[in-house]
């Protein structure tokens, strides 16, 4: 879980932060559902995305 938050902070959240709570909520949701689960490969999954790994098993 800690690694997820580190990735979120370093890969997605802008250094200046977000302008509003709703903007942050929307962008972080896009990261989790769109990028982190669908596109970003994970080393513990042999380079597969979480969704692809779950689909295969």
Image (cartoon, rainbow, N blue to C red):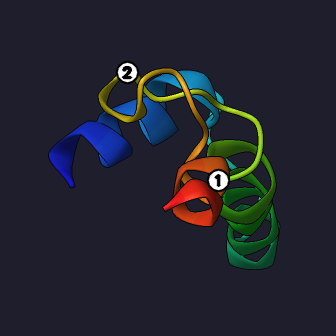
Q: Residue furthest front?
A: 57
N-terminal of the two: label 1 or label 2? Answer: 1
Q: Residues within 10 Å of mark 2 (few under 14, many from 20)?
A: few
The residue under label 1 is 37
The answer to which quarter of the image holds residue 23 is bottom right
Q: Secondary structure at mark 2?
A: helix
List x then y, in percent, for residue 4. 35, 45
Q: Residue 15: tell me if it is visible.
A: no
List x then y, in percent, for residue 12. 64, 34
Q: Secondary structure at mark 1?
A: loop
Q: Nearer the viewer, residue 40 or 26?
A: 40
Q: Nearer the viewer, residue 25 or 18?
A: 25
Horizontal side, residue 30 vs residue 36: left or right? right
* Picture quarter with the N terminus: bottom left
Q: Residue 9: tell me if it is visible.
A: yes
The answer to which quarter of the image holds residue 22 is bottom right
């Amino acid at each position: 879980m800690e690694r997820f938050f580190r990735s979120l902070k370093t890969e997605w959240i802008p250094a200046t932060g977000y302008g509003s709570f709703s903007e942050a909520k929307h962008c972080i949701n896009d990261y989790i559902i769109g990028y982190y689960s669908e596109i970003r490969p994970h080393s513990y999954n042999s380079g597969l995305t979480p969704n692809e790994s779950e689909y295969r098993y």
